Amino acid sequence: MENLKNQNAIITGGGRGLGKATAIAFAKEGINVAITGRNENNLKETVAELQALGVKATYAVFDIANYEEVKAGIAKIVAEFKTVDILVNNAGVAQFGTLLEMDPKTWTDIINTNLLGSYYVTHEVLPHIIANGQGDIFNVSSTAGLSGNAGTSAYSASKFGLIGLSESILREVRKHNIRVCTLTPSTIASDMSKELNLTDGDPEKVLQPEDFAELLVGTLKLPRRALLKSAAIWSTNP
């Protein structure tokens, strides 16, 4: 079992939802955590919770769809943490509508955030993980990245693309002892899912952010020789 204490992690979209739950789960394992997002108040509140758990925690405010902001934000985090062991590409957006209903700007904004944003962040973080000689990257896709449905063309295209990106990176970095895991969860009771009325969030039936976070922690604890290439976590009986 891997010892996670004193490793350094970056989690995008870490101020709420899946990202915040993951940040808290990591901190409970002794992992230092840097979170990113666009809402500074959410980030500050989460960092305070992480620090209360006894780890180093920091944040950077940026839009992952803006490459210049990403470069500056990741540079700030690296200047504080010095090294990076774990990257969780979690930040994303969702909107739904048929191909003709959704305006082109909204459609491309979803691609720019969910696909290009993960590329931008990975591009800036990966050299630091390679420098460590080992590390872990999680890319959060979706069941919508495995199967398209009416009204999901933009979201599905972004998540299909992320799977392709993730699997390609895996094959490039295994030689550096870096594990890349592609996650394809079904609907989780995250803030975004509830805001979009995708679920009522019933904790008795619906996957919770903490369940997702537990999967990531368990994956990190696998012996370094073991790589979980992909994982799909579903609600048992929603």
Image (spheres, rainbow, N blue to C red):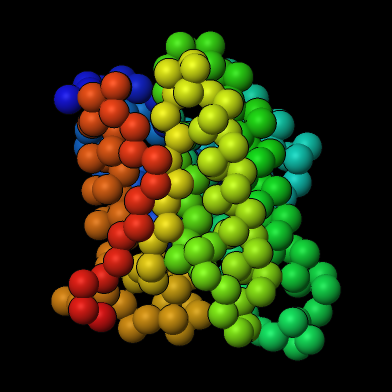
Residue that appears at 77% across and 64% down? 108
Image coordinates for residue 162, horizontal then vertical, percent: 59, 51
Q: Residue at x 71, y 31 (%)?
A: 71
The vertical placement of 232 against 216, above or below, is below
**22 relative to 129, above or below:** below
29 left or right, relative to 154: left
Counting every numbered tag in the picture gives 0
Residue nearer the viewer, 132 or 59: 132
The quadrant of the picture occupied by the C terminus is bottom left
Q: Quarter holding the N terminus?
A: top left
Residue placed farthest to the right in the image?
104
| Relative vertical location of residue 3 with respect to residue 70 in this rendering, above or below | above
Left or right position of 174 against 186: right
In this view of the protein, can residue 177 be seen by the observer?
A: yes
Residue at the image position 58 percent from the left and 26 percent from the top: 172
62, 153: nearer the viewer: 153
**Percent x, y of residue 180:** 45, 35
Let me know if residue 203 appears in the view. Answer: no
- Identified at 57% across, 34% down, the residue is 169
For the residue pair 138 and 146, the one nearer the viewer reads as: 146
Choose between 76 and 162: the one closer to the eye. 162
Q: Position of residue 178 (x, y in %)?
A: 45, 24
> In the rendering, at what x and y percent does residue 53 appear?
24, 36
Q: Would residue 50 appear left or right of 161 to someone viewing this image?
A: left
